Amino acid sequence: MVHGDGLSFGRGSVHESVEVTDTVVRVGARTTAVRAACPGCGCWSGRIHGSYVRFPRDLPAVGKVVVVSLQVRRFVCADDCCPRKTFAEQVPGLTRRFGRRTERLRSTLVSVGLALAGRAGARMTDAFKATVSRNTLLRLIGSLPDPATVAQRVVGVDEYAQRKGRIYGTVLVDVATRRPIDLLPDREADTLAAGLAERPDIEVVCRDRAPFFTEGATRDALQALQVADRWHLWHNLGEAAEKHEQGHALAA
Ligand SMILES: [Zn+2]
């Protein structure tokens, strides 16, 4: 057991001890704030009702799992009319209500989940000793607040492969953010037309070369101006230049 020197371990707490075993690092910490704000009514209170220990898991260190033994307190709400009566304090940036992980471990797992999603993400968390299941990863992503919806004025339309490339669907991509905004189940012109009709804010459609996209984008979404996708323009230009060069080579 190594005793700490009272260094800050997240705002509003100090770490007091570090215990290292073959597989786990246990950091003992306690909160230091004199008062805490009630999450129900916002009133500050310094009246302590009791204390208990939480064990949020933290980011791994030196190849070992890190667990914080965090002593937190329960306060009596200063407002007699508040239905909560008592409340547990949270350490900003470290804990949240009912959270079993520190906020930095949580945000790291969310990043892994967003980059790799289900199974691949779960395998990656295992690789850096913060193992969580595929379902936990998906739940963490699911609990993120929805991004603010902004009108997508310029939208790219392309196809995507489902089921090992045997069935194709249509994806609408917000060109500004590069995020997919909708997946349509097939490549039918009618489906695309209906999808575009539901989004009157779309002003410009960058389309793929497939002919049905042209038809769908013009039929019911007349407010949207079609422009060929820049990549495809370059691709076409490249092909044309190549043919031209080949023509010269053959003639020579
Ligand atoms: Zn309250």
Image: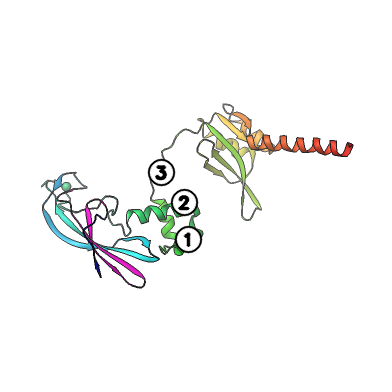
Visual colour scheme: rainbow
x, y percent for residue 46: 12, 50
- Give residue 109's quadrant in the image: bottom left
Please tell me which of labels 2 and 3 falls first in the chain: 2
Residue toward you, 211 or 188: 211
Residue linked to disc 3: 146
Residue linked to disc 2: 114
Residue toward you, 244 or 214: 244
| Cα gap from disc 1 to disc 3, whole angstroms | 25 Å
Query: How many residues crowd mark 1 within 10 Å: few (<14), some (14–19), many (20+)?
Result: some
Please tell me which of labels 1 and 2 falls first in the chain: 2
The amino acid beneath tag 2 is Leu
In the rendered image, the quadrant that contains the N terminus is bottom left
Residue toward you, 26 or 88: 26
Residue 23 painted magenta: yes
Query: How many residues crowd mark 2 within 10 Å: few (<14), some (14–19), many (20+)?
Result: some
Which stretch appears magenta? 10-36
| Cα gap from disc 2 to disc 3, whole angstroms | 13 Å
Residue located at (23% from left, 62% from top): 4
Residue located at (64% from left, 41% from top): 188
- Give residue 2's quadrant in the image: bottom left
The answer as to whether callout 3 falls within 8 Å of ligand 1 is no
Residue located at (63% from left, 30% from top): 227
Magenta residues: mostly which secondary structure?
strand
